[in-house]
């Protein structure tokens, strides 16, 4: 027998049992985005390598260690996109979308990073990214956060995620802070691990989000970024907090939140869940007012975020939100002479009467027990049962599979009952 070929490590199939959850997530997110007037943009999955090294920064984890880079047949260095912002900005500049204009954009698709695969961390993963160009106030930052909060509510996970917020100020403010931080870290060099020692000079702010508890201890007394913030960034941040307070959105200011990519300034935020272990950030974003210019466009303020769909799917699975997993609302069970035809007829009628209702008919015979087992397997909320007696007097047995109640009702009343139940 030939040796079977397997998928690439960290790149997963999405199987039919799981696609309903993905579809639910994707459609909810799209629906919320459209409710705020955002438009979809689609970019290629491959870009020139130097787009990413220039946008993300040479000394970031992504560019140093995680990119899938290869030479194509022309000898050009290309890279599978590790994130969407760089490509979105490139597309915006190239197509004249950003100069003197407002754009509210989103995209959805696979990203590629060569990381160590583990729960919530893969080599091909999927993001929904949102980017707004041409607006520099805290109002749009606040709207983005409110929009994500609405997504969590619509998905039913709002109690399982929390918001962390920070301002990392202007480029100059960060440069001043950087000097103070490096001076402090130099005094504690003996405690630093290899990673932090390396970062101390290449990208010292990244030391702040170390997971090493010993280093975290010495960071307690490190200089604070907030003491170095420029006046305008302070005002921007205060404005954002005020808007979030008014919208009733809870947040924690986390002074150590700096985020991994170089291009951020001012607002940075993350939505975090405690339900997934170490890979708990489901969404992260912030302002990147300098990036458009850095990539060759006319200066344009920008803010955006990206959410990791695998982590959200894992969260939905962990919380076992049955209703989200459900692909069938009603399972039609029939047994006895002439009942199959009656069942199909009733199913057709219900599809007419209850828009969006998902009805699956049982085929292939078998006793009630076997049929109910199938109904459970597909996760139906309700079974409708037609035996010879029911067909004879135009009734049907309605069994609530979530609560177990069972009643016999007239066929003409089923649609109304289902509308209430589902
Ligand atoms: P992390 O700190 O978990 O590595 P990150 O800061 O590298 O995340 P971003 O570049 O901000 O992540 O990407 C936004 C979101 O995309 C993350 O919050 C996460 O939900 C998701 N994500 C990032 N990398 C991966 C990955 N390798 N596998 C699955 N999801 C990912
Ligand atoms: Mg990462």
Image (spheres, rainbow, N blue to C red):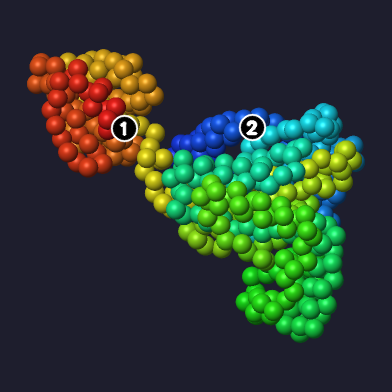
Q: Residue at x 67, y 62 (%)?
A: 257
Q: Residue at x 72, y 71 (%)?
A: 224
Residue receiving disc 1: 422
Looking at the rendered image, the quarter that the N terminus falls into is top right
Where is residue 323? Give x, y as percent.
37, 40
Question: Label 1 neighbourhood size at 10 Å, few (<14), some (14-19), many (20+)?
Answer: few
Looking at the rendered image, the quarter that the C terminus falls into is top left
Where is residue 293? Give x, y as percent.
87, 43
Residue receiving disc 2: 38
Number of labels in the image equals: 2
41 shown above or below 262: above
Q: Residue at x 77, y 62 (%)?
A: 229
Where is residue 281? Give x, y as percent.
58, 56
Where is residue 325? Give x, y as percent.
41, 40
Q: Nearer the viewer, residue 237 or 361?
A: 237
The reply, left or right, for residue 253 in relation to residue 262 is left
Question: Label 2 neighbourhood size at 10 Å, few (<14), some (14-19), many (20+)?
Answer: some
Question: Are the residues tagged 1 and 2 within 8 Å (C-beta)?
Answer: no
Q: Nearer the viewer, residue 342 or 278?
A: 278
Numbered label attached to residue 121? none
Callout in the foreground (1, 2) = 2
238 shown above or below 407: below
Q: What is the distance, in whole Å, between disc 1 and disc 2 at their CAs? A: 30 Å
Q: Residue at x 56, y 44 (%)?
A: 146
Helix, strand or loop at label 1? It is: loop
Name the N-terminal-most of marks 1 and 2: 2
Q: Nearer the viewer, residue 323 or 10?
A: 323
The reply, left or right, for residue 53 in relation to residue 26 is right
Quarter where residue 343 is shown: top left
> Does residue 417 appear anywhere in the picture?
yes
201 shown above or below 95: below
């Amino acid at each position: 027998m030939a040796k079977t070929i397997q998928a690439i490590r960290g790149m997963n199939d999405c199987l039919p049992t799981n696609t309903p959850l993905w579809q639910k997530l994707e459609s909810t997110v799209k629906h919320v985005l459209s409710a705020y007037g955002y438009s979809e943009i689609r970019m290629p999955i491959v870009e020139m390598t130097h787009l990413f090294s220039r946008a993300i920064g040479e000394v970031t984890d992504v560019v140093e260690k995680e990119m899938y880079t290869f030479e194509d047949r022309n000898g050009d260095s290309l890279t599978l996109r590790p994130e969407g912002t760089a490509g979105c900005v490139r597309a915006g500049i190239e197509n004249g979308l950003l100069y003197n204009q407002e754009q509210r954009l989103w995209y959805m698709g696979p990203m590629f990073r060569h990381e160590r695969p583990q729960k919530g961390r893969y080599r091909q993963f999927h993001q929904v990214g949102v980017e707004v160009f041409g607006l520099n106030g805290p109002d749009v930052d606040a709207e983005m956060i409110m929009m994500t909060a609405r997504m969590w509510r619509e998905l039913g996970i709002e109690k399982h995620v929390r918001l962390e917020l920070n301002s990392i100020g202007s480029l100059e403010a960060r440069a001043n802070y950087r000097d103070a931080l490096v001076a402090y870290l130099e005094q504690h060099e003996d405690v630093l691990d290899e990673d932090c020692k390396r970062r101390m000079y290449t990208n010292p702010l990244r030391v702040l989000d170390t997971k090493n508890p010993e280093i975290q201890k010495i960071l307690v007394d490190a200089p604070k970024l907030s003491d170095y913030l420029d006046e305008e960034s302070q005002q921007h941040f205060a404005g954002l907090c005020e808007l979030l307070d008014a919208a009733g959105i809870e947040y924690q200011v986390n002074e150590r939140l700096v985020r991994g990519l170089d291009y951020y300034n001012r607002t940075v935020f993350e939505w975090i869940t405690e339900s997934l272990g170490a890979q708990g950030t489901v969404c992260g974003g912030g302002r990147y007012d300098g990036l458009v210019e850095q990539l060759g466009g006319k200066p344009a303020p920008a803010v955006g975020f990206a959410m990791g769909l695998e982590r959200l799917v894992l969260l939905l699975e962990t919380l076992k939100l049955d209703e989200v997993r459900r692909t069938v609302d009603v399972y039609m069970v029939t047994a006895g002479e002439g009942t199959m035809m009656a069942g199909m007829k009733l199913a057709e009628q219900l599809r007419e009467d209850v828009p969006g209702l998902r009805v699956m008919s049982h085929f292939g015979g078998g006793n009630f027990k076997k049929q109910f087992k199938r109904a459970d397997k597909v996760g139906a909320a309700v079974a409708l049962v037609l035996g010879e007696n029911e067909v004879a007097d135009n009734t049907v047995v309605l069994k609530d599979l979530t609560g177990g109640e069972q009643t016999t009702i007239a066929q003409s009343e089923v649609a109304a009952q289902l509308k209430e139940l589902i």
